[in-house]
Amino acid sequence: MFYLLRKSFFVKPKLLFKYVVYALLTVVITSVCILVVMRRTIYTTDALENLVNESEIRAVQSAMMSPFGWIVLILLVVIGIQSLIRFHKIIGPIYALEKIIAMIKGGHIGGHISLRRGDELKDLALEVEDMSNAIKSYVKKDRIIIADISCELDSIAKSSNQEDLKNRLAEIKNKLSEVTSDFKLNE
C-alpha cells in the first residue's frame, strides 16, 4: 500500500510559477489595453470638450492614473494569490501522481492515493489507483499459479511413472500458459 504526503507547498515550483506568471501577464496586458483606451477616450470624448488646452487634459489623465495604478496593483495581488492556490490544487496532484507512477514502475503496486480536500484530478488518481490494484490482483493470481506449478514439479520429481510424468508435464505447460495471460501487449 502506498501513501504519499506532500511536505512542501511548492512541490513543482517551476511549473507552478510559470502558470502564475501567465495569469499575472494577462492582468498586465489587459491593464495596458484598458489604459490605452482610457487615454484615447479622454482626448476624443465630447464630455471633456470644455478642456481648452493640453495641460488640462494631462491633469485629468494624471488624476486618473493613481486610482488606476491601485486597481492594477490590487488585481495583480488578488489574481496572483488566487492563481497560486488554484494551480497548487492542480499541480500538487500531478506531483503525487508522478510519484505514484514512479513507485509502480519500481514494482510497488496496489494501495490508495490520498489527495487533499479540494484537489483536482481526483478522477485520474482513482483510475491510477484502480490500475495499480488490478495489476496487483493479476500478480497475485499469477503467483498462485506459479506456486501450484512449483508444488507440482516437486511432486513430479518424486514420481517414476513415465505416463504419469507426461500427463503432469502437459498440465504444467497449460498452467504456464495462463501466467501473465491477463496482459495484452501492444506492439
Image (cartoon, rainbow, N blue to C red):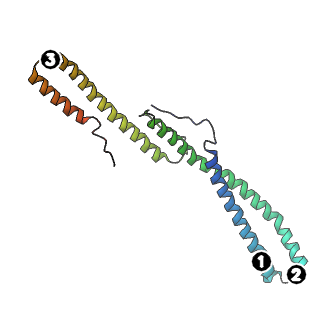
Mark toward the viewer: 1 or 2: 1
Mark 1–mark 3 Cα distance, whole angstroms, equals 100 Å
Mark 2 — residue? 51
Residue under the point 52% across and 39% down: 99
From the viewer's perspective, tell me whether residue 6 is left or right of residue 184: right
Q: Neighbour class for label 3 at 10 Å: few (<14), some, many (≥20)?
A: few
Kindly identify the residue that appears in the image at 87 percent across and 74 percent down: 58
Residue at point 45%, 34% (across, down): 106
Give left or right: position of 16 versus 121.
right
Q: Position of residue 120 (x, y in %)?
A: 53, 48
Disc 3 is placed on an element classified as loop
Which amino acid is tagged 1? Answer: Arg
Which of the pair 163/146 is nearer the observer? 163
The residues tagged by marks 3 and 2 sit, at their Cα atoms, a distance apart of: 113 Å
Label 1 neighbourhood size at 10 Å, few (<14), some (14-19), many (20+)?
A: few
Nearest the camera: 105 or 111?
A: 105
Q: Quadrant of the N terminus?
A: top left
Q: Is residue 130 above or below residue 158?
A: below
